[in-house]
Each structure stands twice: as C-alpha cells, then as structure tokens.
Image (cartoon, rainbow, N blue to C red):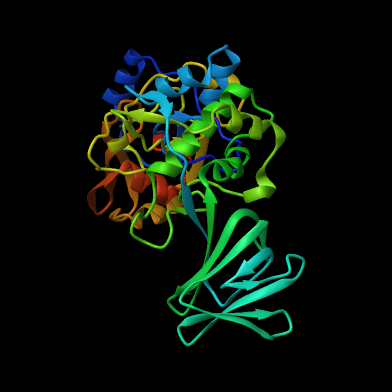
C-alpha cells in the first residue's frame, strides 16, 4: 500500500457518499468562519488513510452487494484490466541495522549444511557476515552476503516464520535481514494482515490481486530489497499471517494482476475513502506528484454500509493545543481561522490558509493532517465559542 496505504488496525471506515452538489457547496464554504474569539476548535471529517485507489471497506461493501473481484478492482483503478503476470521472487526487508540475526529452520547457508531444528546467529565482522552456532562456534564465513535456504521455511527470531530464503547482508554498522519469497507466498502473508479473513471472499480476492500488483510494481529495483514488511509498502506477516480463507482467495486469483496499458499498475489502497476516493496528486500519498491515469477519484457507494465507527469522525482541540500543533507547519501566533482554498475531487483539503494572530500561512491538506494527527485530509473546521 501501500499501504500507504493502508488499513491501520483494520477498524476504520469513512463517511457517507458526498453528492457533487453537496461537495461543491462544501468547497465554496471552504471551512471559512468569522474570526471571532473561540474557546475550542472542532474538526469533523471522513476517511482513514490516503484515499487513493481501492477502499478496503468499500471493496467489502461491493462484495456484499454481489460484485466480483474483477468488477471491484476495475472500478477503483480507472481504465484497468485484470490479466496474467509471470511468476517472480520479491525481496522483503524484515530488519535493518540489526546487531545480529538469529534464525532456525534453514537447511543450508553459505554452502554449509545446517540442522533445521537448531538456531544459528549471523553477525557482522570486518565488513562481512559470519555464521555462528548459538554457543558461538563459527559455522561459516559468508563474506558480503549470507543466504540461508528454508526447509521449507525460516524462523527469524523476534519476527516470524517465512517461506523462501533468508538473506543477511551488511547495512552501515549493522545487518539487513531480507526475505526472498515467491510472489504468491508473499501475497499469502499479506492478505489477512490487510483485510480481515472473515470478510466476503470476493473482497479478499480483490485484496489479493491488489496486493500482488502492488508487490510486483513497487519497490527499490536497484537496491537490496523491493518492499518493506509494514505499511511503508504493505503489511506482511509471513506464514503466521496465512489463513485457510485468505489462502483460498490467493489461490483463486493466482498470478493475476491489475494492468494498465499492458503494465502492472501500482495499486495503492487504503482503509476507507469516506464515500469518494481521491486523485493521487491531491492526496497525502504523493501530494503534488504527476497525475496517474488509473488513480482517479471515484464514487464509493457501498462503503458506508460496512459499519465502521469511522464512518464519520470528529476531533476537538483547545485553542492553545491546535495553535501549538499548527505552529509546527508555520502558523504565526494563535489560530484565528482556517480558510480552505482548494479541495480535491472529494472534499479532501488540497490547500488552506491558516490565519494566525501574527499573519497568514499557506499549507497543504497533508501538512494539516500530519500536524493534527487526523485520520484523513477530508476535514472541516469550526470554532466553538
């Protein structure tokens, strides 16, 4: 998720669909209020996450209404199709800067046979990796990279169990631990971390295809890894995250991806859209980036039926508290007013003016979201006297 991307604790849902006329009225109002002295500020909003691409709770709603995963995905990713892709291995970062990496379950490493039931420790020494037993005996001097083959999975202490292989290499003054895993096994470890296994099977299939597409389209192609194992990419839990139902969803969509003009689309997704997704260039995902044709804002008509407590959200701030928080993004003095200058295809804030006792500061919606720790940039400000 991307994600972003992405769902946090899998509990968020946003608000009801905003009709164009209502959205226009909200944009015209711009959140502007008379600059009278306020005792508190109330922020009301909708959405959780960046709002780009597939809404996970929206996909749940579509599935409950009888839509299949292909229809769900092509709704959220404008102008795309679902098609086959070749198998591939991805590289997922599990740890970075570690002093040592302890593991078991491997059958071999650095050309040396290992006992899967025993634990081994990879350590950094003179710029290379040395493999030792738990008692400290040197097993192998691996040079710049240690590769341990799972038999068939490797258990990394403090992290989890992973299919495929474990690679350990120097990174600065520490070590990186990277899981080299087949894309299908990777997706098996993602789906239940991103969507509850209890959800309808078509929603889980949509999540599987989105996760596969994101995994294949994202990452550092020239670095040591492609993906993080957390929401900087998408949550990945390895074998421990797999369930029978999510495995069913992955198997039913094997090697299928979202395609745009024949290439795998970067399928960002987030928890909830609030009734309307957002253009990528207006979102906290990649504010100001070039528009992506398949990441356009679309209506999300069934999301509100999923029953999330985040269908609508509200935050209340005292004047000193909101002023202190917004000073981190340039507010001058005490907050007097928030004038929204531009909203996106949804009511998400693109740009706003913070009117302070010491002057006016122009900021972006994502900056406001981060400064106030709001669930989304879909927000309206009101002063309480």
Q: Quick one: quadrant of the C terminus?
A: top left
The N terminus appears in which quarter of the rendering? top left
Occupied quadrant, residue 66: top right
Residue at the image position 57 percent from the left and 18 percent from the top: 63
Q: How many marks?
A: 0
Image quadrant where residue 259 sits: top left
Residue 278, percent from left and from top: 35, 30
Task: Specify whether residue 369 is in view.
Answer: yes
Q: In the rendered image of this protein, does residue 178 appear above or below residue 267?
A: below
**Residue 48 visible in the displayed image:** no
> Which residue is rendered at x = 44% and y = 48% of the image?
372
Spot occupied by residue 131 in the image (x, y as percentages of width and height): 61, 78
Q: Residue at the right extreme?
A: 117
From the viewer's side, name the closer residue of 19 and 385.
Answer: 19
Side of 339 relative to 90 (left or right): left
Where is residue 324? Give x, y as percent.
Answer: 40, 56
Query: Is residue 48 found left or right of 74 in the rendered image?
Result: right
Position above or below: 170 against 105: below
């Amino acid at each position: 998720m991307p994600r972003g991307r992405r769902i946090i604790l899998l509990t968020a849902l946003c608000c009801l669909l905003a009709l164009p006329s209502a959205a226009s009225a909200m944009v015209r109002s711009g959140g502007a209020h008379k600059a009278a002295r306020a005792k508190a500020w109330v922020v009301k909003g909708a959405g959780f996450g960046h709002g780009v691409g597939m809404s996970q709770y929206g996909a749940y709603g579509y599935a409950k209404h009888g839509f299949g995963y292909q229809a769900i995905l092509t709704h959220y990713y404008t102008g795309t199709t679902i098609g086959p892709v070749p198998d591939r291995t991805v590289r997922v970062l599990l740890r970075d800067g570690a002093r040592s990496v302890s593991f078991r379950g491997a059958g071999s490493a650095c050309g040396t046979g290992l006992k899967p039931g025993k634990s081994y420790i990879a350590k950094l020494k003179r710029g290379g990796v040395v493999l030792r037993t738990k008692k400290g005996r040197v097993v192998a001097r691996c040079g710049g990279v240690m590769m341990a083959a799972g038999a068939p999975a490797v258990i990394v202490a403090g992290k989890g169990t992973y299919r495929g292989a474990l690679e350990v290499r120097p990174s600065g003054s520490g070590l990186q631990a990277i899981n080299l895993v087949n894309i299908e096994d990777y997706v098996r470890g993602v789906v239940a971390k991103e969507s509850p296994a209890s959800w309808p099977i078509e929603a889980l299939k949509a999540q599987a295809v989105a996760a596969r597409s994101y995994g294949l389209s994202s990452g550092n192609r020239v670095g040591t890894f492609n993906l993080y194992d957390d929401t900087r990419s998408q949550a990945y839990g390895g074998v421990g995250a797999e369930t029978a139902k999510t495995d069913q969803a992955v198997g039913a969509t094997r090697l299928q991806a979202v395609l745009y003009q024949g290439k795998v689309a970067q399928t960002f997704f987030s928890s909830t859209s609030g009734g309307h997704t957002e253009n990528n260039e207006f979102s906290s995902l990649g504010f100001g980036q070039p528009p992506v044709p398949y990441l356009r804002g679309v209506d999300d008509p069934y999301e509100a039926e999923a029953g999330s407590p985040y269908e609508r959200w509200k935050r209340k701030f005292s004047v000193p508290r909101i002023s202190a928080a917004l000073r981190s993004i340039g507010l001058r003095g005490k907050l007097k007013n928030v004038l929204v200058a531009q909203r996106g295809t949804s009511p998400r804030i693109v740009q706003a003016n913070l009117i302070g006792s010491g002057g006016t500061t122009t900021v972006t919606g994502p900056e406001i979201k981060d400064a106030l720790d709001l669930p989304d940039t879909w927000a309206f400000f009101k002063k309480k006297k």
